[in-house]
Amino acid sequence: MTVTASLANGQSVTFTLTEIPTEASVVLVTSPAANTLLQGAANSPSSMPITVTVSTNGGQPIPNVSVRLVTISLYASPASPTANCATQAGADAGSVLTNSAGLATCNVVFGRVPSTGPAPNNPAYLRVLIGGVEYFLYPQNYDSAVTLGLGGPDGFAAPPNARYGLMVTPATPAAVQIIGGNFQCANRGQTIPRSLVVQVLDGSSPPNPVLSTPVTWSVVPSGTAVVTPMSPTTDSNGWSNATVVLASELRCGFGASDRHDHKWNNGDLQPLCQRVCYHYRLGLGPRW
């Protein structure tokens, strides 16, 4: 059956609902086997799809039944690894639907948060939720990765009394881009007003942010400023932030051929923020 919500201008959305048959239904995860470990890089597809069949006890296929993944972790948090079905056209985000033969194929896509250690440290698990939404009928079972209560009208949990292991490895960084903080000015000894922000991306199309990736910051010429990263690795957005404090006595170095490094001279520097350093190269006059 369908339920439609409409506006006076003709715009509408339609919900598809499936009535559970009076006859007992059969839900079967046909592959992979229960307790299989699904492992792959963050933001990437798994090579191992999960297939589900839904039918009546008499063998009649049931179409348009939603299938999605529920990630289970004894230490669940926004920093926990996840995986979802690649969204099928016409289905809710992260879900697929059974076809006329009662068959659904969930092409697993790993989330962007990597696992915190090699299996079995800090394990995460998956179960398949069939014909329901992510609502826990029995919240007291939430922490049980084996007996998670997803039964009744809120859907069927599969495989029965079992689960799939989940291990997400870090994505490979492919590119870095500036998010903010470029082209700022400050007096010597002062902190640049806004922090410098970069984002690390993977090689997907479109690219995804890469979490927990170290970023190295450096200054040229050396010694003209102190850069302090706000964290050693990228955050949940793939961002790395750093504060910059200009040295109180900045020195310029332009190579081994230079014979002198001269300190800033307030009388000689014109108030142009692009002129960060002031240097005399013998016989060439001032260098900006």
Image (spheres, helix red, strand yellow):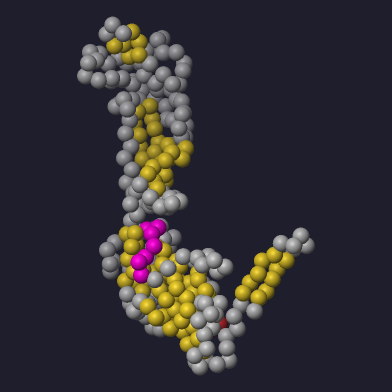
- Give the image quarter of residue 119: bottom left
Q: Position of residue 238 (x, y in %)?
A: 41, 49
Left or right, residue 22 beside residue 174: right
Q: Main secondary structure of the magenta part?
A: loop
Instruction: Name the residue: 39% across, 32% down.
Output: 244
> Within the magenta stretch, is there residue 205?
no
x and y, in percent, of residue 103 in the image = 47, 79
Q: Which quadrant would the N terminus be assigned to in this image?
A: bottom right
The quarter in which the C terminus is drawn is top left
Q: Residue furthest top?
A: 283
- The front one of 174 and 284 is 174
Residue positioned 31% across, 11% down in the render: 280
Report x, y in % for residue 100: 53, 80
Q: Is residue 240 visible?
A: no
Query: Which residues are drawn in magenta?
Result: 42-48
Q: Is residue 245 above or below residue 81?
A: above
Quarter of image, res 38: bottom left
Q: Nearer the viewer, residue 231 or 253?
A: 253
